[in-house]
Amino acid sequence: MPWRRNVYAVTAANFLGYTGFTLVMPFLPLFIIQLGVTDVGRVALWTGLSLGVTPGLTALLAPAWGRLGDRYGRKIMVERSLASFVVLMTAMAYVTQAWHVLALRAVQGFFAGYGSLSVAMAAESAPRERMSSAIGLVQTAQRLGPGVGPVIGGALAAVVGLRHAFVATAMFYGIALAVVFWFYDERVLARNLEDPAVATMAAGAVERITFRRVLGFQNFMLMMAVIFGLQFVDRSFGPVLPLYVEQVGTAHARVPLVAGVLFSIMACTGALGHHVCAKLLSRFAMPVVIAGGVAATAAGSALLTATANLWAMGVASTLLGIGVGAAMTASYTAAGRVIPAGAHGAAFGVLTSASLTGMAVSPFVAGVLGGTSIRAVFFLDLVLMIALAVAVPRLMTSEP
């Protein structure tokens, strides 16, 4: 079916992009050290700022890009993003100062966001009854890529160095760009509309629906809060986990490999959470699935807070991955089901802003807290997840 080709295209592109990204970014603290920063607090701060600036700037632009996507097509927006990453990741191989990394990541913020746009592309390509499966498939790829990337990146860093890994990342993005260009067909979206009258009405919805109306969709603001919280927790480990692994006694030479394995566990179990979400939603109510995933994430954060044992950290990573994966897919599905035809760009743009804001704020907060206590980062994650686990069953109205 044509819609399946679209979903598979964005799934493959996301797998390639996220694999390439995690060849290097989980080890950014170590790269900052190579650039001459030695103080642990300053390393965590530079890493947090560098990881956070891109999604922060992208979050400001996401609703506008969504509107442009409704008008001119989201395919060109994703191609724009992927092409910029080819150039900018190559440039990172040649930086000499920590602020160079920060500057390049800031430039990426004006072009990034292909991951969230891809979720919208999959959701609108699929029939309504297959939306959760399509969203879950793309998000599974977004998790499986990071499951492979850190292990490859850790080995690559040990053999050829982190600088050459940035060039490899650029190559991954180049292949992803080619996949979207050749295989994603936006004409499928028009064929999803049942008749010309519906198509006309959908086109008119783009003009009529304001961002204020988007926020008024059923459960929409609650899902924004959940998506923000899950992204906050998920991205809080990048600036501090490699430092924490070394802090608990791991030899410096083994830190990239051990941290890479933990990141990979989170990624692979997160992919499992995304994949099984559709099945869970067929058996349980939407609030139960979301709250259950958030509770599992809270349990993983609590275990990280309480232990320094590497095996226990592996168990915590498993809980975190499954919880974030299942709850994230369910939240996007709950929001997607109330978005009217023709307004996917505007509505998913707002969701993207919530997601990217979490991605932007989290590394910065983690970097600041990590300079004093890395466990404080995990404790903050725990508190946030407990609050959401309590709020979802109380505030979420009946499923549309």
Image (tube, rainbow, N blue to C red):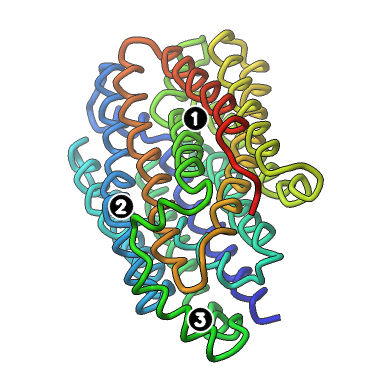
Cα separation between marks 3 and 2:
23 Å
Which residue is drawn at the image coordinates 59% and 51% (left, top)?
334
Which residue type carries mark 2? Answer: Thr
Quadrant of res 264? top right
Residue 256 numbered mark, or none: 1
The correct choice, above or below, for 38 with respect to 107 in the image is above
Which residue type carries mark 3? Answer: Glu
Which residue type carries mark 1? Answer: Pro
Q: Position of residue 283 (x, y in %)?
A: 81, 45
Instruction: For mark 3, give the secondary structure.
Output: loop
Residue 319 appears left or right of 256: right
Instruction: For mark 1, give the secondary structure.
Output: helix
Q: Position of residue 42 (x, y in %)?
A: 24, 21
Q: Between disc 1 and disc 2, whose residue precedes?
A: 2
Which residue is drawn at the image coordinates 30% and 47% (left, top)?
54
Residue 324 appears left or right of 381: right
Q: What residue would you read off at disc 2? A: 58
Q: Between disc 3 and disc 2, whose residue precedes?
A: 2
Quadrant of res 265? top right
Q: Position of residue 301 (x, y in %)?
A: 56, 20
CB contact under 8 Å: marks 1 and 2: no
Cα separation between marks 3 and 1:
41 Å
Between residues 214 and 186, which one lies in front from this camera angle?
214
